Amino acid sequence: MFRPLISSALVLAQTLALLGVVGACGGNVANAQWVLVGDAWQTDAVGSPDCVNMTENVADETSAAWNECALDLEQDFAFSFDVNLGADPAGADGMCFVLHQAGTGPFTVGNSGGDIAYVGGPFNPSVCIEIDTYQNGPIDPPFDPAYDHIGIDSNGQNNHALAGPVQANVTNGNIEDGVDHSFEVTWDAENTLLEVYFDGALRLDLSLDMVNSIFGGNGEVQWGWVSSTGGATNVQSFCMTSADYSAAAPELTLLVDPEQFICGDGSVELSAEAAPGADISWNGVSGSTTTASVTGTYVVESLFAGCEASAEVTVDIQPVPVISFEVEGEPVSGAIDLCFDQVAVVDVVATEGATAGWDDNGLPSIGLTQSGEYSAFAGTPGCSAVPQTLEVSLLPVPQTEVVATPETLCWEESGVLQLNVSADALVDSIAWPDGTNSLTQAGPGGYEFFMVGDNGCENSETFAYPMLPPIVSGLVDPDPLCDDSVATLSITGNVDNIAWNTGSSGTELTVLPSMGSGPFVANVTLGACSRSDTAHVTWWPTPSVGTLQDSVSRCVLGPGYTFAWPDQSEPAVGTWIWTVNGEPATAGYNAFEEGLYTIEVSDNVTGCFDTHETVLNVLPNLALDIDVDDPLICLGDSTSVEVTVLPVLDTDPYEIPFSLEWSTEGMSGLTNNAAGGQHFVIATNACGSVEVMAEVEEEYCGCNLWIPNTFTPDGDGLNEGFQIVSSCQWDVFSFRVFNRWGEQVWSTFDQDRPWDGGADDLGEGKHYLPDGVYTYVVRWEYRDKGVFFKDQKVGHVLLMR
């Protein structure tokens, strides 16, 4: 989508590019741009060649103004106009911008009045953008609104079938104010989008494939304006301010290339064709063909339906080029003789303006290395030279073969050089390397042999006699090693092959203590040169710390842990030195503190050593403390007894497992309920045992009653019954249980009988009650020291299976 650029220059801009053809509207712009029909007339105001007066204040006028050049809807267009709808707000009837295919003849106009010269005309197919200034048929077709409006119609009907109506000016319903209003129409061919602007504002946009849905696939249309008055009138006019579109040109086509070349004296026929009925001329001379025989530009033009197209053909007369040959800038004629070792660079040259080259490579120069006949070409566009050939004979140059014995010299040796010179040639001179002047005592370096042949060709050969550097194996005796180490003998010099007397062949030889001290001989070669080098290995005895454990332990109250040093299998070079954690240690070293101990034995002369790490764990001895919550309890009662395991010398008593054993049956662990009496407990771990005793005394305190709050009659042998326990014997006892509805479910008068969760009082013990909370009532009577006591207790118990 795009907007037109409004220009004050009232000029129609049209462009067409088809096969080099340019088309444009012809004739005088002021007099020939518009074909006027009916009451339309073109103004002659200065500076307004594109202005047309469509109607006067006269009833029932009809008019049309069609542009001479047809429009191509396959391309974008943009038109800008100043429209004036008159100064009478009650006037009529308006104007319509029309695209159609009915030509530009005198009958291409419709009816007056509300038809706006569009309805009743030969406008099927067509598209009309109406600017309607009169309300026709507000309740009947065309159903015009009361305000001045814009709509899009088609095919000779003004019923706003395609778009609208909308108020023409965004803010003012009356545009019959005698003022020029800007009116713009744009077409986006790719997106088939038609847009209408009035006074700079977008008023309508329509997405419509006009070429196919309106014009049956033919995008060539006429364009322009129609206008009318009826019973009401107004002076109505337009001025085109800018136009950007592609005109339907006269289809001018060149039948020859736009660039023509003539070789030497000659001519060429130029031809073109155009649409049927178009006038064709070459350089102003009528006719579709012309003969060109001189250099220049030839213009062909065609005129059709007021539009013209033109094309150009350039003609260039070329002289026939001439070929010649040069070697290093010097002309060559006839055959040439060259020595074989010389690369003959021959240039092919042509007369000015021509391009020349050799057939073999297409380039203007060629390096010739063998005898033969070589062809060259030259030419200009459309003009070729007569091909020329050059005969070349290459003469052999003298050659020599250098044979060296040996091929490569060992360090500081000499050899023999033999020259095999080609027939019909001799060695004229030799350039020697420093220190050599004889082929039988040839030293290393570069030699150059200068030769001359009987044919006069010269040549030189160079020869480099190589000498190998001195063989340096780099083999040395390693430093003395402890006999638990591995020695590596290395060849680090410039050698090709290695053979050890041990059978190995690598650059490194691994020597174990079991292989002894040697000798270890390396036979090395560099090229054809060889050398032998020898190395020995010195081994020192390595001590042993013995079979020490990784982890040992002692009890905190026990003696220290004793490390024992073993005897060594070999005597030390100097003295065996023992250390523990870096400190000197004698035999029978005792360790007390917990931690990591590094034991090392080393030779104070060689430094050979052995080391081991042992972790000493200090285990805790046990100490106990026992606490009785209530040392004096009622007869038959119990109290809490708690045992505390105490640390000894900052050790953790729980670091290693320990066991507790009670003298009283049923007691275990650190916390217990104890009855009256003496209760002994023994704690034992890996470091020994310790015993403490708790003593609980009893006294008579009267009857005590114990009633549990939960029991689980699930058959596992634990908490199977709910029973009242007392410290005395009752004279009268009653125990009853009730459910949540107050029903008695179980009862007994036997204080030794527990409730098993059954419903004896309800179902004769044939079923069990569900889990839940039940209410109990306990009543009892007894005498104590002649005193009568009577009491009861009410509570709840949870039955849970």
Image: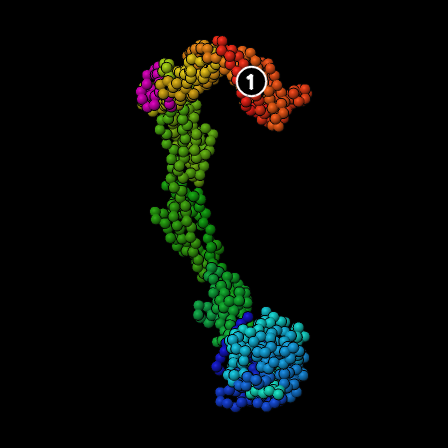
Residue 671 in the image: above or below residue 338: above
Instruction: State the residue in front, 345 or 478.
Output: 478
Q: Amino acid at mark 1?
A: Arg
Taking the spot 45% from the left edge, 16% from the top edge, the residue there is 639
Q: Does residue 4 appear anywhere in the picture?
A: no
Q: In the rendered structure, which segment of residues is drawn in magenta?
A: 577-596
Taking the spot 46% from the left edge, 51% from the top edge, the residue there is 401
Taking the spot 53% from the left edge, 65% from the top edge, the residue there is 361
Question: Residue 134 placed where, x, y %?
Answer: 59, 82
The picture quadrant where one finds residue 302 is bottom right
Instruction: State the residue in front, 20 or 659.
Output: 659
Crowding near the residue tagged with mark 1, few <14, some 14–19, many ≥20 C-alpha atoms within 10 Å: some
Give SS at disc 1: strand
| Residue denoted by label 1 | 779
* Residue found at the far top of this picture: 785
Residue 410 in the image: above or below residue 362: above
Taking the spot 40% from the left edge, 26% from the top edge, the residue there is 485
